[in-house]
């Protein structure tokens, strides 16, 4: 199940026409996280392909940068990384910084006081969990709720509350912030419910940008040789790890852990950059993950995947798999694990059909926002 994507080159982002609408995308574009990088880039490329002048609004905060870099060098806490692993994580960090520099960034401005943000016609807030009030360093940042934005129109695209559960509700202050938006689209049912209960309007449900505007194949980035299963995430349950080892050994498939150390994998590719990640996902025989974008990149590449659940990411992976009819790829905690039944067969063809239908729905929303 290989889905059609775009063949836009990132260099085309700079081929801009003065008469087009200016669009600023406000998201977590400097996170040292493969999914955050690609969702930002894919949305930029998708909006640019519609003929608009687009930039990532480059908010800055020394506090956030320190938190990001600390997390990048010690990503599996409370398990501390060794000195050698920190060196490799440092190499990964530098690859991300180079990738950020190649993006079409606005002049920098302060995250807390965005008075110097450049004027744009439209701001798109999202994707990513930009409204997660429990995010460890971005949680409750008012800019992502529309405060201080220098634009004629403020809309949300594929925004998410992440681990902030709809059962918690929103107090009147955050309800008022959501009313600032001219239009809202979210990427999961949990966020849809929170918005509906807060402001009495049902927001559109749209695809994550990586599914809506998938990255173009990059033949210049090498992928591991031979057959391999890609392990993406950390803190994966022990029974999942044991089942993965048995599944791979029975089939002569190596397990490569990308971006994070998982000692039960055969190889540790800790210094992989964002382009390495996208290429490795496309070339894998299977993906074993507990991360949202592990599921997303498996889906967009038609790669069988198995996702373990975690409390922090449960809302995202549950709603994604339900939206696309891929529930059998989400493991039930405590239930017996049969990875062969999940990973040895192609993805259901109906999943591709649902993605294409959701692309139409997502494009219809963007048509209304951007014209």
Image (cartoon, grey):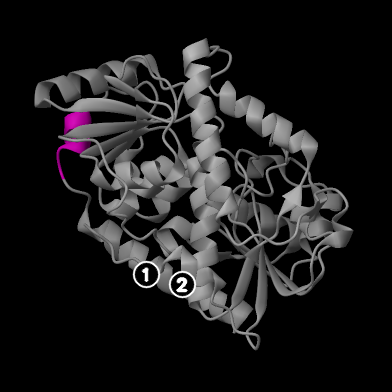
The label number, if any, that marks residue 361 in the structure image: 2
Viewer-closest of 79 and 304: 79
**Residue drawn at (81%, 64%) of the image:** 149
In the picture shown, does residue 229 fall above or below 24? Answer: above
Image side of residue 31 versus residue 9, left or right: right
Residue tagged by mark 1?
A: 357
The answer to which image quadrant residue 327 occupies is: top left
For the N terminus, the image quarter is: bottom left
Tell me which segment is drawn in magenta.
338-345
Q: CA distance from mark 2 to mark 1?
A: 6 Å
Image side of residue 10 versus residue 229, left or right: right
SS under mark 1: helix
The rendered magenta stretch, by its main secondary structure, is classed as: helix
Q: Residue 245: give x, y in percent of width and height.
A: 23, 19
The label number, if any, that marks residue 233 in the structure image: none
Q: Residue 187: give x, y in percent of width and height.
A: 53, 56
For the C terminus, the image quarter is: bottom right
Q: Residue 77: give x, y in percent of width and height.
A: 57, 17
Viewer-closest of 239 and 21: 21
């Amino acid at each position: 199940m290989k889905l059609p994507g775009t063949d836009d080159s990132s260099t085309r982002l700079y081929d801009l026409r003065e008469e087009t609408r200016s669009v600023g995308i406000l998201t977590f574009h400097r996170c040292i996280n493969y999914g955050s990088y690609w969702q930002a880039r894919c949305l930029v490329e998708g909006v640019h392909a519609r003929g608009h002048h687009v930039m990532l609004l480059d908010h800055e905060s020394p506090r956030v940068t320190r938190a990001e870099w600390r997390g990048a060098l010690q990503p599996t806490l409370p398990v501390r990384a060794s000195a050698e692993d920190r060196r490799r994580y440092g190499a990964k960090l530098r690859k991300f910084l180079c990738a950020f520099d190649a993006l079409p960034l606005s002049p920098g401005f302060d995250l807390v006081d965005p008075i110097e943000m450049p004027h744009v016609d439209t701001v798109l807030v999202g994707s990513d969990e930009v409204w997660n009030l429990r995010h460890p360093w971005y949680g409750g940042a008012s800019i992502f709720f529309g405060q201080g934005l220098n634009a004629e129109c403020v809309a949300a695209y594929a925004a998410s509350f992440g681990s902030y559960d709809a059962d918690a509700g929103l107090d009147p202050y955050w309800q008022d912030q959501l009313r600032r938006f001219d239009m809202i689209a979210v990427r999961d049912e949990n966020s849809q419910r929170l918005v509906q209960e807060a402001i009495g309007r049902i927001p559109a449900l749209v695809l994550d940008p990586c599914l809506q505007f998938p990255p173009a194949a990059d033949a210049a980035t090498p992928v591991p040789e031979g057959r391999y299963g890609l392990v993406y995430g950390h803190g994966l349950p022990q029974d999942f790890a044991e089942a993965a080892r048995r599944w791979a050994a029975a089939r002569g498939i190596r397990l490569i852990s990308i971006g994070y150390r998982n000692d039960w994998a055969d190889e540790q590719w800790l210094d992989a950059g964002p382009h390495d990640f996208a290429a490795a996902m496309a070339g894998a025989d299977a993906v074993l993950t507990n991360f949202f974008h592990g599921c997303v990149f498996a889906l967009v590449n038609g790669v069988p995947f198995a996702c373990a659940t975690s409390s922090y990411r449960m809302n995202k992976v549950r709603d994604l798999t339900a939206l696309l009819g891929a529930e059998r790829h989400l493991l039930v905690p405590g239930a017996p694990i049969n990875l062969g039944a999940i990973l040895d067969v192609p993805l259901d063809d109906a999943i591709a059909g649902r993605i294409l239908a959701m692309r139409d729905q997502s494009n219809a929303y963007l048509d209304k926002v951007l014209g």
